Image: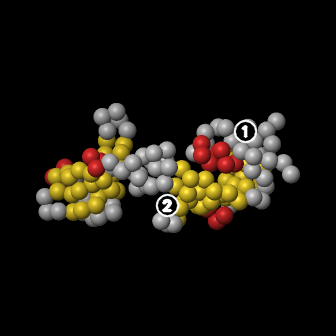
């Protein structure tokens, strides 16, 4: 049976879980998604598992937090005076805000606490500090020309 190799486009379904088993991502309606092995379209640890995999086979890959969204960093949790928020905003925990960075990019901040004078926001990615466990199923191989 043919196996997937670098340069092949494969169709796969996946479920991503954190170490405690919480599902944090999966293919929509179990519809396979294309990935070209070797094009850095997915984490290298996942590509390594796909390389040599056969159609219909299931496998797992683990991407450490350092290679995924990095460690949680306490310095990314800050208090912002409410006076600096847009006047029409009623802040609530779980709400996200976009903060303009000096380089022109936008950073997503999640409000974690609302006080009378300030709000506490977390600039860490929601999956920072989490190892990601991929459950993979290879559906089809489109062999490189």
Q: Is residue 22 above or below residue 72?
A: below
Residue at (47% x, 65% y) in the render: 20
| 95 displayed left or right of 43 | left
Q: Where is residue 132 in the image (x, y as percent from the top left)?
A: 52, 55
Judged from the image, the secondary structure of the residue bearing numbered disc 2 is loop
Residues at marks 1 and 2, CA–CA distance in whole angstroms: 27 Å
Residue at (41% x, 52% y) in the render: 128
Q: How crowded is mark 2: few (under 14 residues within 10 Å), some or many (20 or more)?
A: some
Q: Residues within 10 Å of mark 1 (few under 14, many from 20)?
A: some
Q: Where is residue 144 in the image (x, y as percent from the top left)?
A: 79, 38
Count the marks.
Answer: 2
Name the residue tied to disc 1.
6
Task: Give the colour scheme shown.
Answer: secondary structure
Q: Which of marks 1 and 2 is nearer the N terminus?
A: 1
Label annotation for residue 82 = none
Name the residue tied to disc 2.
18
Residue at (75% x, 58% y) in the render: 57
Q: In this view, does 76 lie above or below 95?
A: above
Q: Position of residue 93 (x, y in %)?
A: 29, 64
| 124 displayed left or right of 18 | left
| 143 displayed left or right of 118 | right
Q: In this view, does 81 lie above or below 17?
A: above
Q: Residue furthest left?
A: 117
Q: Residue furthest right?
A: 1
Does the image show residue 93?
A: yes
Q: Where is residue 58 in the image (x, y as percent from the top left)?
A: 71, 59
């Amino acid at each position: 049976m043919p196996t997937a190799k670098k340069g092949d486009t494969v169709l796969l379904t996946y479920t991503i879980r954190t170490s405690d088993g919480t599902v944090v991502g999966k293919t929509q309606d179990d519809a396979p998604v294309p990935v070209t092995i070797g094009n850095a379209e997915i984490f290298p640890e996942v590509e390594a598992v796909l390389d040599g995999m056969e159609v219909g086979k299931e496998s797992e890959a683990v991407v450490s937090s350092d290679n995924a969204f990095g460690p949680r960093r306490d310095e990314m949790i800050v208090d912002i005076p409410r006076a600096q928020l847009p006047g029409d905003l009623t802040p609530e925990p779980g709400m996200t805000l976009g903060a303009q960075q000096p380089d022109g990019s936008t950073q997503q901040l999640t409000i974690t606490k609302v006080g009378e004078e300030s709000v506490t926001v977390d600039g860490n990615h929601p999956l920072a500090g989490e190892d990601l466990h991929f459950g993979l199923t290879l559906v089809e191989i489109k062999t490189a020309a």
